[in-house]
């Protein structure tokens, strides 16, 4: 009986010690609002340890899969011209490109067959814009920052 009590006390202490640790995740973001880093911080009274995730740089194009094609959007943030490229997109096929301000003002609204295509934001004030690309029944939204 005494042995069972000791084991139970030991387990209780381990559980309490586990709850005494503070766990948090800290993220870092680039100017476009994209998450570029993650740190998992485990802190207890006796030690602090951080594990860093690999960072990506803002100079690399944003790459994603869109309608079975590889989509590249860069540079973001931009000083004016934004390049949108769909690798493997069929020649002559068109997609819809819409860029609007956060207040709803439409900046670019066109169907395009150009690949890559350039969206010119040089006449737009600095701020955050929403870009939407539509092809068939696929839709993708992006946050674009104009510096």
Image (cartoon, rainbow, N blue to C red):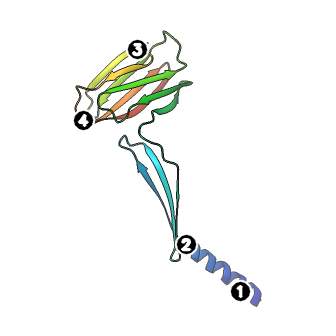
Give the residue number, with chain letter if any, for mark 2: 19
Rendering quarter of residue 106: top left
SS for tag 4? loop
Which numbered disc flags the more N-terminal residue, 3 or 2? Answer: 2
| Residue at the image point whose x is 76% and y is 87% from the top | 3
Question: What residue sits 72% from the left and 82% below the top?
Answer: 7
Return the residue at label 1.
6
Q: Is residue 59 above or below residue 93?
A: below
In percent of width and height, residue 46 lies at 53, 77
Task: Pinpoint residue 59: horizontal percent, then vertical percent.
Answer: 42, 37
Asked whether disc 3 touches disc 2, contact meaning CB atoms under 8 Å apart, the reply is: no
Determine whether the residue tagged by mark 2 lies in a helix, strand or loop: helix
Q: Quadrant of residue 99?
A: top left
| Residue displayed at 35% across by 23% down | 98
Tell me how far mark 3 sits from mark 4, CA to CA: 25 Å
Alpha carbon distance from label 1 to label 2? 20 Å
Quarter of the image where one finds residue 18: bottom right
How crowded pointer 3 is (Cα within 10 Å; few <14, some 14-19, many 20+) is rated as some
Most foreground residue, 9 or 58:
58
Height in image: 77 above or below 35?
above
Whole-number angstrom distance, CA of label 3 to CA of label 1? 74 Å
Q: Which mark is residue 126?
A: 4
Mark 3 or 2: in front is: 3
**Structural crowding at the residue carrying mark 2, measured as other residues with C-alpha within 10 Å and reported as few (<14), some (14–19) or many (≥20):** few
Which labelled disc corresponds to residue 112?
3
The mark lying in front, picked from 4 and 1, is 4
| Precedes in sequence: disc 1 or disc 2 | 1
């Amino acid at each position: 009986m005494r042995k069972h009590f000791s084991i139970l006390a030991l387990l209780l202490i381990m559980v309490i010690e586990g709850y005494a640790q503070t766990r948090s995740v800290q993220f870092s973001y680039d100017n476009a609002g994209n998450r570029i880093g993650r740190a998992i911080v485990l802190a207890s009274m006796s030690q602090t340890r951080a594990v860093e995730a690999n960072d990506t740089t803002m100079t690399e194009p944003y790459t994603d899969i869109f309608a079975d094609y590889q989509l590249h959007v860069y540079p973001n943030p931009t000083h004016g011209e934004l390049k949108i490229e769909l690798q493997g997109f069929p020649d002559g096929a068109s997609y819809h490109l819409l860029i609007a301000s956060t207040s709803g003002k439409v900046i670019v609204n066109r169907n395009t067959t150009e690949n890559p295509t350039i969206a010119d934001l040089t006449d737009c004030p600095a701020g955050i814009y929403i870009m939407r690309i539509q092809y068939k029944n696929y839709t993708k939204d992006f946050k674009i920052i104009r510096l």
